[in-house]
Image (tube, rainbow, N blue to C red):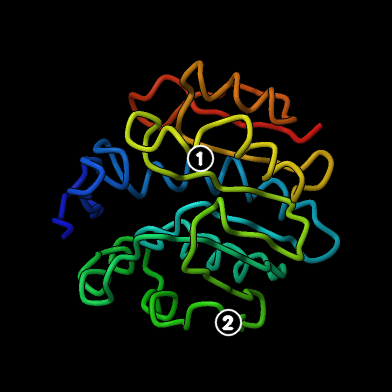
Amino acid sequence: MERFIITEDGSHSLFSAKFNQQYHSLQGALDESKHIYINLGLKPVLENASGPVYVFEMGFGTGLNAFLAWKLADSLQKQVFYTTVEAYPVSEDEAALLNYEALTGETDFMELHKSPWGVQNNISPNFVFQKELTTIEEFNSGHIFDVVFYDAFDPRAQPELWTAEIFAKIAAQTKQAGVLVTYSSKGIVKRALRAGGFKVERHKGPGRKTHVLKAIKL
């Protein structure tokens, strides 16, 4: 069962009792998603894209990253194919109470949560969305991705998701010079990314967070 958290920027997050972790930074869920996944990850790729951009998200969670990606695709009139996996989905009832529409001025957030699992859904002319009810270990895609949002729970809670083996699997489905972004800048994460086939860059984090990571597929 999840419980609501109001983060410092006023945006909602949830707490997972199963993993004893919140879904976002307590300093600001919306600020974190915009800073890492949109501004550091997707936006530069999308602005320079001459064709469709393929995005993979590890951890659909509350749907905030996907929501922001969708609205960016619409605003730039660039096509995004977005695939995400989630093993422990948030209920539609809980998702309906999240305040992301009110804070962003955007609409139709619940379309992502109502989208059927395992089905490619044309959410908008610019955003093709597919969510898979599975684990990263079991997931395989026919796509090669341009951008990866890596948003699993903290390595202390899910150490099995931050290994060289997992990142090597992701690298095999990421194009050369493709981008992976994540909030965790721990040493074990940097080492695992490098061993998995990525060049690792450290960037300023949102708010008071010192660093986040951007990794480039070699």
Which quarter of the image is occupied by the C terminus? Answer: top right
Q: Is residue 128 above or below residue 166?
A: below
Instruction: Report the residue at 64% width, 50% height from top.
Output: 43
Instruction: Report the residue at 62% width, 65% height from top.
Output: 82
Looking at the image, residue 143 sits to the left or right of residue 119; the answer is right
Number of dots carrying numbers: 2
Q: Position of residue 214 (x, y in %)?
A: 62, 32
Q: Residue furthest front?
A: 138
Between tags 1 and 2, which lies in front?
2
Q: Amino acid at mark 1?
A: Ile
Q: In the rendered structure, are the residues bearing label 1 and label 2 in contact, judged by CB atoms less than 8 Å apart?
A: no
Query: In the image shown, does 99 or 65 lie closer to the viewer?
Result: 65
Q: Position of residue 170 (x, y in %)?
A: 67, 45
Crowding at mark 2 (Cα within 10 Å: few <14, some 14-19, many 20+)? few
Q: Position of residue 169 (x, y in %)?
A: 68, 44
**Secondary structure state at the residue bearing disc 1:** helix
**Secondary structure state at the residue bearing disc 2:** loop
- Residue behind mark 1: 36
The residues bearing labels 1 and 2 have C-alpha atoms spaced at a distance of 27 Å
Looking at the image, residue 36 sits to the left or right of residue 64; the answer is right
- Residue behind mark 2: 119
Looking at the image, residue 197 sits to the left or right of residue 8; the answer is right
